[in-house]
Amino acid sequence: MTQTNKTPEPKVESLFNRIAPNYDKMNSLISLGNHKRWREIAMQRLDVQPGNFAIDVCCGTGDWTISLAKAVGPSGQVIGLDFSKEMLKIASEKIKAAGVQDRVTLVEGDAMHLPFDDRKFDVATIGFGLRNVPDADQVLREMVRVVRTNGKITCLETSQPTNPAIKMGWNAYFKTVPVMAKFAVNKYREYHYLQRTTKQFVSAEKLAKMFEDAGMHNVTYRTFTMGAAALHLGRA
C-alpha cells in the first residue's frame, strides 16, 4: 500500500456528502479557477473519440464526466462512479443541464472494487479523488483491470512542488484553505482534512512509478502551477 488515506472510509464519505453543495465553489476558489484549464489539457491529451466507452472514477459533481460525455458523442457511453450520494445528486442535475443524460450513467460505487467486468472501457479517468481513497495502488489496479488493452488511464491530482522555495509558498497557501472554507462555506473541519490529504499525497514522480507498478505502460506526466497539481497518463 504505497499511499493510504488513514481516515476511515465512512467518515470520508460523510465528509463529501456534507461539502457537496459547495464543492464546485470551493474548487474554483482553492485552485484560483485553474482546475478547469487543467481538465481541458487532460482532455486534449486523452484524445477521446466519438463512440468510446469511458469511466470517470470518483466523479464527484460530474464536471469531468460531462467533458467525457461531450467527447464520446451520442454513439458513446460514460459511467460516472462515486461513493457520495450527495455528489451524485448534483452530478445528475449538471448532466441534465448539459444535455448529455442520454449517454451518461451514474453509479454509486467503490473505486477500490469497480463493479465492472475486465477490459470493458476505452478510457478511465480520476480527478482529485486518488488522494482520498484507502489504497491508491488498489484503485489504479482496478482502473487497469477494467480498461481494454492499450486503453488510456489518466489522473489529475494535487501534487508536491519540488523547488524548496515554491514548496514553502505552496504549503503556506494551503494552510489558509480551511480558513477560506470557514468564511466562504462554514466548513473549516472538512477542508482541514482536504488540506491534510493534499499535503500528504505523493510526488508526481512517485505517482508515475505507481502507475507503472499497477501495470500501465507509456506512462507520462506533466505538472501545473509550479507543481501544485499533476496530470498522469498511462496505457493499460
Image: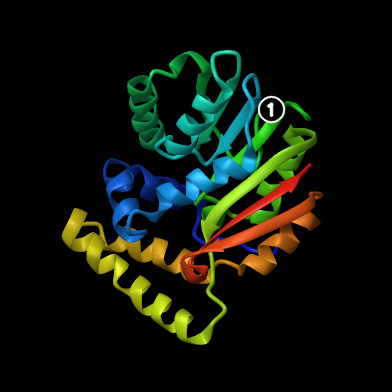
Quadrant where the N terminus sits is bottom right
Residue toward you, 216 or 110: 216
Q: In the displayed image of the protein, which residue is found farthest to the bottom?
A: 165
- Tell me if 2 is positioned left or right of 58 in this view: right
**Residue in the picture at 52% in, 69% down:** 227
Q: In the displayed image of the protein, which residue is found farthest to the left?
A: 183
Answer few, some or many: residues within 10 Å of disc 1's Cα (few below 14, many 20 plus, some between 14 and 19).
few
- Tell me if 26 is positioned left or right of 126 in this view: left
Residue 89 percent across, percent down from the top left: 36, 29
**Residue in the picture at 75% in, 41% down:** 144
Relative to 51, residue 166 above or below:
below
Residue 173 percent across, percent down from the top left: 34, 74
Judging from the image, the colouring scheme is rainbow
- Tell me if 175 is positioned left or right of 44 in this view: left
Q: Amino acid at mark 1?
A: Phe
Residue 210 percent across, percent down from the top left: 73, 59
Count the numbered circles shown.
1
**Residue in the picture at 55% in, 19% down:** 73
- Tell me if 182 is positioned left or right of 145 in this view: left
Q: Based on the displayed image, in which of its 4 quarters is residue 3 positioned? A: bottom right
Residue toward you, 233 or 8: 233
Residue 45 percent across, percent down from the top left: 62, 44
Q: Which residue is mark 1?
A: 116
For label 1, the SS is loop
Quadrant where the C terminus sits is top right
**Residue in the picture at 49% in, 52% down:** 128
Q: Based on the displayed image, in which of its 4 quarters is residue 99 positioned? A: top left
Residue toward you, 223 or 64: 223
